[in-house]
Amino acid sequence: MSVNNIITNDNERCNFALIGLYEVDDPEVGLNVVDLGLIYQLDFDSEEKKLDALMTLTTQFCPMGESIQSNVTQSLSNAFPDWQINVNLTFEPPWDFSKISPEGREFLGH
Amino acid sequence: MFSPLMGGLQKTTDYRVVLPFYIYASVSFVVATILLLLHTDIVESNYFYSYTLAITHTMALGWGTMIIFGASHQLLPVLVEGKLDSNTLAYLTFGFAAVGIPILIVSFYIFHFGWLLQTGAILVNIAIIFYIINVFLSSFKSKKRNVHAWFIITASLWLFSTTFFGLLLVFNFTKNILPNNSVSYLSIHAHMGLVGWFLLMVIGVGSRLIPMFLISKYTNDKTLWKIFWLVNISLISFIVFKTLELSTLYYYISILLAFIAVLLFADHCLKAKKVRIRKNVDEQMKTSLLSILQMILPLIVLIITLIFLPTKQHDNIILLYGFCILFGWITAIILGMTFKTLPFIVWNKVYHKKAYTGKTPAPKELFNEKVYKLMLIMYIAGFVLFIFGTIFLISLIVKIAAVALLFAAVLYVTNTSKVLLHKPKKL
């Protein structure tokens, strides 16, 4: 299953998570992490109340990387207050233009 | 399909390490432009003149080097793909440089070539030794050493060569420790700093930051290695030709190599710009890209000096060469990159621990864009007028140019202060 190109095992919870994630911007680009395509995967374990998120950054050398990761974690914690949240980073596959949503592309002038 | 990153993100450098360098550099820029305004007559004097030496070292050390120190301590993790080895070494670098540089400048200003100048030169050298140790430890503890890391390692070695040679020249004024008098070595000393330190550093850092800030995926290590060797061979060949006192015709070889290197770097940046993901290029990036074009200007001035002015004394053109470098591309790239890097540093400081308590301002909102644009207009006007006034030796135009540059420096300080004093908005 996927929502906005995000691989997930729970569409409903994923949609709920996205409400908050749309508010988390990459400060340099000025675009939210969802439209930018930085969120790769959201895995919900409702029995263990555990959420594993996998995300990337526009570049491995992003000076704001820690802050963006921290903001994503906080946003997911706000959405699922009594859940254990793990946000991991990956650069495989690397982020590229194809990951950006049509709305994001429009925002970036394409 | 996805493999989580092992070892986590690279750590950013503590802002307390970096910000003093930025503040010091800002003040130095204002001091340099005040000195320039007070002593515009330098355009009609020999380059070995107390005020020229004072302004040159204020710009090269107080402005250019201090801000590069600050930025490189911040960016070293990005460049070497590791982390800054020691905050203490960074503080020591700042402490010794902060004391040594003004002593050196005052010595030049009052033309005191004895113990005062020697003290300043020793302190600056100690600062640079601490800096080099930090760069080396940070680089060699990192598992990978990419082309950018080699640029910064080599540039820091050239910096030490410059200042150590400068120290020898300083002592050579009072005791004959070199075969010739110190003035005859000044061009070697200057080019080690301008080409070995500034050019290598700007290309090494710029080749990573410019694509990054343009949100461009373009990279070409092969070209960057070519540039790396071209710049180094250009500089080494010049030092050899000059030391062997060969005909000035040989200098064209060095100039040609540097020219090709600059063209390749410009081409690298333009290619990065072409495939950028974000179409809008902000003013800071436009200034940085302008600075790359400005790199060609001093090379043209140098060729003119060698071709058309071989026999007569044309000190104003020699001074113009130095001006086009220090007040030209070095200043332009600093003006642009300051307002790309400093807002990030302060943003991380202010908002990092306020993660997701609502929308935070973008880093670009930390400075005033109108003030930035006005600064840029003043800078470009001052730069162009100074060139015109220096070529035709029109003192009024040089004076107006110096006023414009002083305004640019004041506006720069105004905007950096706004960023540095930024307080979190109520979220």
Image (cartoon, coloured by chain):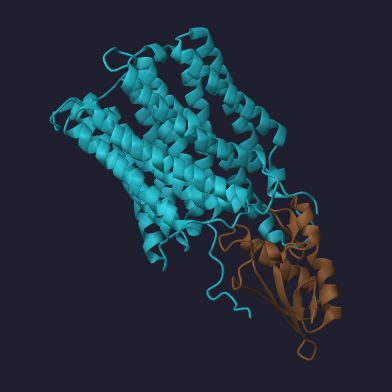
Chain colours: A brown, B cyan
- Residue B48 seen from this side: yes
Placement of the C terminus of chain B among the 4 image quadrants: bottom right
Where residue B422 sits in the image (x, y, percent)?
68, 44
- The mark total stands at 0
On the picture, is B39 further left or further right than B209?
A: left
The answer to which of B110 and B48 lies nearer the viewer is B48
The answer to which of B360 and B304 lies nearer the viewer is B304
- Residue B189 seen from this side: no
The answer to which of B294 and A77 lies nearer the viewer is B294
| Residue shown at 64% from the left, 32% from the top | B414
Dividing the picture into quadrants, the one containing residue B141 is bottom left
| Residue shown at 45% from the left, 57% from the top | B221
Where residue B212 sits in the image (x, y, percent)?
58, 53
Where residue B140 sits in the image (x, y, percent)?
37, 63
Dividing the picture into quadrants, the one containing residue A100 is bottom right
Above or below for B273 versus B181:
below
Placement of the N terminus of chain B among the 4 image quadrants: bottom right
Above or below for B422 versus B219:
above
| Residue shown at 70% from the left, 67% from the top | A38
Above or below for A47 versus B245:
below
On the picture, is B236 further left or further right than B321?
A: left
Above or below for A35 versus B31:
below
Where residue B110 sits in the image (x, y, percent)?
34, 19
